């Protein structure tokens, strides 16, 4: 059950230029949140931005009763959020949305993330590893703009069998898109399930590759939000229906969907 | 302050003609889903009434995304009346709404006079409480006629910007229902008083105002409109002074009770609308920011009246006049 909470910021860390990890005290979120879910955060107190901003839960620490979000400064809301310091209060609603499917027996798993899409995938790998322990071998495919924006690599290395990295400019890892890299490995590595989060064109290609190789696939979608709880119908996304299509809503029916449910447009 | 704060009870009962609410705080159509979504944060039983999302005769998919752009102290939306349609609403949503311990206002939209007549008569059949338990809450408490939606191409606002057709729509609904009829006015007109008089002669029992203001936002990087629908309806604190002015003008133009809305986010805002002439207030966009806003507003309103020695919240209605 999501709740409206006001809690203390425990720490703020700039992971790369304009990308911040905010650790927030909240036993409730630490206990309740599942990978793929998000919190809807009030970024400022004034009138500069009035709507909350959706940010994925990147990890939880159930012992300490904290959770992390990692966000990139994009506009006014995230810029205000970046000004918070340890000890400040932050107001949020969560945990919101449908979580990733957690298989009982994970088998061969891959996660494919582009840019800010990698954060919910980290929580997912952490939970999968927590359930299956050492026998878990998930591969992470992480795409970044350049080496300066490549973050959380060590965190992913601790959880994943292999970490594959691509950068647009080739300054680290494979030069090109993360989808190209995933395409090269998808067939040979025999994955059972792939999870993707990132820009829509990237996810579209991951879905095509998954279909072609008989891999089950879940994606996490992004859409602008008004309420975050299913009341305003702003966050529509096209989904398949027997006789055509309909709109579902990312905040409530998603953000996680099976690839076969949705119709992605560029 | 001492002499005023004597801790007396303030009567919150709000009479809008024959529509009697337990208090003057309502939630606005399209911002409150079908009553379930916010129930965990703000119990419907503590509200005067809830207004459900606009219903049309047939289901509507709504507009393509993006449907939202945030602007200074407000937001533009172009949801485009996405709704399950009349039949599905009656079968799947109304039974659940009838369980809620609050007055339910059903917001209806159409594309022709026949659409409005049809919806009014179909809903009329379901307006009666089914048993004694429902007598206080169940069924439908009132119909709100949306003649002011800026987000659909035909109908909607077209009815709300021409006095003759606004009057005709209200008349059509009135002929087909025994429920109190609320006419919801569009602010996208030159003379709001003229529109109020038109719906009043059409037989409206109550007037609610304002719906969203038609607006637009352009992304200077892509050099294209932000909303897929290009234009949308502006809501939130940005529109509040316009709404207060219109409530003030309509209060002077007609005798009908008014429901005021447009950017109400705090109890102070609600008091302002009531002083301008609103007997009740509706909370829209503020729900997105603070799901507990309606409760906090109600509490503030009550405290304001108590501290100033009023025995009924209705005593402050229209005090800004004369
Ligand atoms: C379910 C979900 C999870 C998300 N998780 C993360 C995360 O973990 N880390 C992270 O950095 N970002 C995440 N985002 C994106 C984040 O919400 C947006 O970057 C943020 O809302 C931008 O707000 P702003 O005020 O800074 O920018 P604005 O000035 O509002 O806009 C700047 C740009 O961001 C885009 N944008 C605005 N609002 C949204 C929105 N609600 N969703 C997507 N794009 C938007 C616009 O297209 C615009 O070009 C997530 C979005 C969703 C829907
Ligand atoms: C997302 C959204 C959807 C809306 N949908 C409807 C609707 O279906 N019918 C209607 O009469 N008004 C609709 N409105 C208008 C509101 O009911 C209200 O009149 C307006 O937003 C002004 O109030 P506010 O500033 O408090 O939001 C909608 C507003 C928003 C923001
Ligand atoms: S953001 Fe309001 S319904 Fe999804």
Image: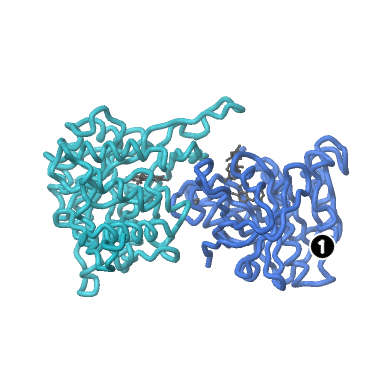
| Residue occupying the point 56% across, 60% down | A96
Residue B83 visible (yes or no): yes
A225 over A104 or under it: above or below: above
- Residue A101, image x and y in percent? 65, 64
Residue located at (78% from left, 39% from top)? A145
- The disc numbered 1 marks a residue on which chain? A
User: Given the current orientation, which residue lies at the most extreme top position?
Assistant: B223
Q: Who is closer to the viewer here, B89 or A49?
A: A49
Image quadrant assignment for residue B162? top left
Q: Quadrant of residue B10?
A: bottom left
B189 vs A102, left or right, is left
Color style of the picture: by chain
Q: Which residue is mark 1?
A: A159
* Shade representing chain A: blue
Measuring from the top left, give residue B136's x and y in whole percent: 22, 69
Question: Which residue: 65% across, 68% down?
Answer: A30
Q: Is residue B129 above or below residue A148?
A: below
Residue A102 in the figure: left or right of residue B164: right
SS class, disc 1 = helix
Q: Position of residue A246 (x, y in %)?
A: 48, 48
Is residue A188 left or right of B214 when viewed as pictured?
A: right
Image height check: is A239 above or below B229?
below
Q: Nearer the viewer, residue A67 or A246?
A: A67
Colour cyan, chain: B
- List x then y, in percent, for residue B64: 49, 39
């Amino acid at each position: 059950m999501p709740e409206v909470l006001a809690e203390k910021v425990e720490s703020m860390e700039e992971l790369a230029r304009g990308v911040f990890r905010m650790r927030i005290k909240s036993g409730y979120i630490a206990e309740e949140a599942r990978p793929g879910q998000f919190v809807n955060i009030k970024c400022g107190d004034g009138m500069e931005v009035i709507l909350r901003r959706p940010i994925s839960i990147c990890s939880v620490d159930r012992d300490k009763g904290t959770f992390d979000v990692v966000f990139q400064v994009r506009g006014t809301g995230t810029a205000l959020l970046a000004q918070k310091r340890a000890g400040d209060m932050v107001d949020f609603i969560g945990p919101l949305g449908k979580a990733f499917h957690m298989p009982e027996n994970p088998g061969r798993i891959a996660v494919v993330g582009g840019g800010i899409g990698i954060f919910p995938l980290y929580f997912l790998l952490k939970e999968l590893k927590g359930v299956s322990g050492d026998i878990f071998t998930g591969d992470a495919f992480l795409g970044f703009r350049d080496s300066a924006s490549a973050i959380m690599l060590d965190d992913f290395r601790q959880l994943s069998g292999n970490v594959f990295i691509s950068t647009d400019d080739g300054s680290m890892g494979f030069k090109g898109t993360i989808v190209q890299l995933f395409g090269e490995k998808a067939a040979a590595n025999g994955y059972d399930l792939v999870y993707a989060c990132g820009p829509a064109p990237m996810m579209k290609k991951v879905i095509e590759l998954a279909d072609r190789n008989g891999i089950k696939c879940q994606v996490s979608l992004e859409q602008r939000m008004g309420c975050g709880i299913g009341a305003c119908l702003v966050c529509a996304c096209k989904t398949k229906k027997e006789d055509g299509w309909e709109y579902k809503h990312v905040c409530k029916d998603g953000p996680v969907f099976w690839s076969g449910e949705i119709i992605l447009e560029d | 302050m001492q002499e005023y704060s004597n801790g007396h009870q303030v009567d919150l009962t709000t009479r809008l003609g024959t529509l009697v609410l337990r208090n003057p705080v309502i939630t606005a159509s399209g911002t409150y889903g079908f009553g379930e979504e916010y129930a965990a944060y703000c119990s419907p039983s503590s509200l005067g009434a809830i207004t459900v999302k606009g219903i049309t005769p047939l289901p509507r998919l709504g507009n393509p995304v993006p449907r939202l752009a945030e602007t200074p102290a407000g937001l533009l939306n172009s949801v485009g009346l996405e709704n399950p349609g009349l039949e599905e609403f009656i079968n799947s949503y109304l039974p659940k709404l009838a369980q809620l311990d609050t007055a339910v206002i059903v917001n209806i939209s159409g594309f022709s006079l026949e659409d409005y007549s049809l919806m009014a008569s179909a809903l009329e059949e379901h307006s009666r409480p089914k048993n004694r338990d429902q007598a206080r809450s169940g069924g439908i408490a009132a119909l709100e006629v949306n003649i002011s939606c800026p987000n659909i191409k035909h109908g909607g606002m077209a009815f709300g910007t021409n006095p003759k057709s606004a009057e005709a729509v209200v008349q059509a609904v009135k002929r087909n229902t025994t429920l109190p009829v609320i006419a919801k006015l569009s602010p996208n007109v030159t003379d709001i008083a003229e529109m109020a008089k038109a719906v009043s002669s059409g037989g409206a029992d109550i007037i609610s105002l304002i719906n969203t203001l038609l607006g637009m936002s352009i992304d200077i990087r892509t050099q294209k409109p932000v909303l897929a629908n290009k234009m949308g309806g502006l809501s939130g604190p940005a529109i509040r002074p316009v709404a207060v002015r219109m409530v003030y003008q309509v209060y002077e133009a007609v005798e009908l009770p008014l429901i005021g809305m447009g950017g109400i986010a705090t109890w102070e805002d609600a008091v302002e609308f009531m002083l301008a002439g609103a007997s009740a207030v509706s909370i829209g966009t503020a729900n997105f920011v603070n799901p507990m806003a309606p409760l906090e507003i109600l509490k503030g309103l009550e405290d304001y009246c108590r501290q100033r020695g009023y025995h009924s919240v209705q005593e402050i209605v229209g005090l800004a006049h004369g």
